Amino acid sequence: TGFWFGGGNLIETLDGSIWISGRYRNFGDSRTGLGSGQRGLECAIFQSKDRGKTFDKVLSFSKADLSVAGREVVSIEGTALHIMDNGHIELFISTEKTRSYPKGLESFQKPGTGVWSIDRMSSDSVETLSVDSIESVLENFDRPEYLHVKDPVVFDTPDGGTALAFCTHPFTWSSSNTGVSVRPAGASTFEAVE
């Protein structure tokens, strides 16, 4: 009750399944701290085997599940599924993790909030995606103008690379912008496009 589902995308795998990723969120407002609600509570992936008539939840990741490497996730934001050239599946997921703002900017941080970043899971199928494969993809802690990055949108480029578009908030949370990073064909990491 009080939660809605969205903030993701859909893909179709070779077997004809349609997969939808997203997260459950409620009315919590990070501009005033976390006391207003639980916000992004759960990342979920649903599958349809009947061309979109019905969907079944196949995977679910809670904030606790995504809290790895000693960094607590306080909210889950946008997600994106992507099929790689080799057929493997990637799940890009943005989360807000407990972290203090950089030195000199502490006064801008609202109580109970952290810093947004984008992580990635990968596997040979959607069903086998696991937090065991989670790795950081985009985190801009050293550049306050890109301190918060979230809401990944992933697509293939004509030259065989992968583009990762994202929303970025300056350290004040007062505006948002769009950025893009590219993983060139054959590379394993994303590079910021200046």
Image: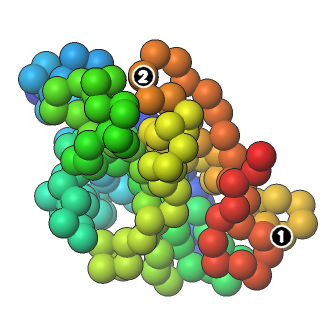
- Of residues 106 and 174, the one nearer the viewer is 106
Determine which quarter of the picture holds residue 183. Answer: bottom right
Note whether residue 31 is visible. yes
Task: Provide residue 161's location: percent of width, then percent of height.
Answer: 78, 67
Mark 1 residue crowding within 10 angstroms, few (<14) / some (14–19) / many (20+): few
Q: Residue at x 23, y 34 (%)?
A: 113
Q: Nearer the viewer, residue 107 or 67?
A: 107
Q: Please report the residue visible at 52 percent of the width from the left and 18 percent of the height from the top.
A: 175
Q: Which residue is mark 1?
A: 160
Using residue 57 as the reference point, say whether residue 51 is left or right of it: right
Residue shown at the point (35%, 41%) measured from the top left: 103
Q: Is residue 26 visible?
A: no
Q: Quadrant of residue 107?
A: top left
> Which residue type does callout 2 highlight?
Thr
- Point out the frontmost of discs 1 and 2: 2
Find residue 37 and report its horizontal and vertical position in percent: 13, 25
Q: Quadrant of the N terminus?
A: top left
Judging by the rendered image, the residue that carries numbered circle 2 is 172
Looking at this rendering, what residue extends furthest in the right direction? 159
Q: Secondary structure at mark 2?
A: loop
